[in-house]
Image (spheres, rainbow, N blue to C red):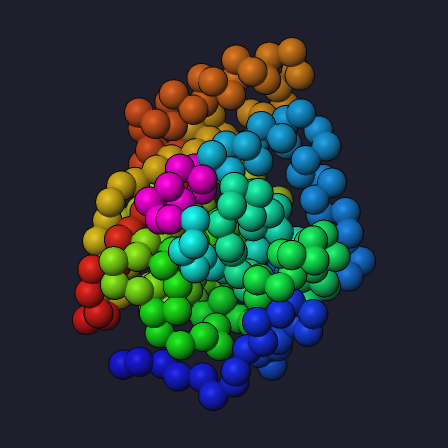
Amino acid sequence: MAKTHPKTLSGSVDALESNVESVRAADTAYTVDNAADYDAKRTIEPRDKRIHNFERDILLSALKNVSKDAKVLEVGCGTGRLLSEGLEAGYQVDGVDASGPMLEHLKAKLTEEQRRHVNLIVAEAADIPKPDASYDFAYTIRLLNQTESPEYALTVVDEIARLVKTGGYFLIEFVNEARPRIGTARRPTTRLRPSEVARRGEAAGGEVITYIGAYWLSMQAYKKCPNPLLGLLSTTDRVLSKLLPRSCARSYVFFRKTGSAE
């Protein structure tokens, strides 16, 4: 069934639209106190740059399936760490996040030209105030593991698929439940299996194009690796992740939208 939203969104980023009454991701959403240093923590250290570049390269490779004038959406964009990479590559990327302070920080980084073309929306990832088939490409990276449960995370997959036009694409990233757990997580993390994400995306009208893996050696390996060895570790990790995508710490399922939800 099609979802409709009576609210008309502005084409400008000057006023952030809000659709948040009860934020289910509130326990992990970033607040005004730490939004400002979010990017710095992920881009200053060489090891964090390697992690960022791995995710950026996966995203930009998937985006090559659409033209530069395609309408693109990032769900869970935060301060725009990856959204900005899409903009730099020449795509027009809208952003949705449940944290207003994160979007305010992102807005401050945009140029005047970008502000005229980018919509930033404060909304729950499973309830985005946009009509069906609004985008040619939609994606989420580093969001689903922060949601309240696997069940809720899969509703976000439904919502992303709903927003994509037939013939368009969507990319879903998540922490891989099929990967044996090593060590103890610092906080509870929602995990999904590649097979269940694939089934959910297919039920929402998608066709799996490919499975992509990241961090076969784990993200903690980057954190502990001496800087002089980071290049070797990163190269090795990328090769192993490509060969064994379903056993990586992080997984991506890349879909093409071929029909309507079942």
- Write the start and end of the magenta stretch as one range: 58-67
Q: Which residue is drawn at 28% across and 51% down?
A: 255
Out of 221 and 84, give the one closest to the viewer.
84
Q: Quadrant of the C terminus?
A: bottom left
Q: In which quarter of the image is the N terminus?
A: bottom left
Q: Can residue 1 be seen in this view?
A: yes
Queried whether the magenta region covers residue 66, the answer comes back as yes
Q: Where is residue 122 in the image (x, y as percent from the top left)?
A: 60, 70
Q: Position of residue 51 (x, y in %)?
A: 56, 32
Left or right: residue 232 versus residue 139 is right
Left or right: residue 139 versus residue 184 is left
Residue 252 placement: quadrant: top left
Q: Identify the residue at the far bottom of this view.
A: 6
Q: Which residue is drawn at 69% across and 70% down?
A: 14
**In this rendering, is residue 147 above or below 177?**
below
Left or right: residue 15 versus residue 58 is right
Task: Count how many numbered circles sit on residues in the image.
Answer: 0
Queried whether the magenta region covers residue 8, the answer comes back as no
Q: Where is residue 240 in the image (x, y as percent from the top left)?
A: 37, 22
Prevailing SS of the magenta stretch: helix
Q: Can residue 145 be seen in this view?
A: no
Q: Which residue is drawn at 33% across and 33% down?
A: 245
Out of 59 and 156, give the one closest to the viewer.
59
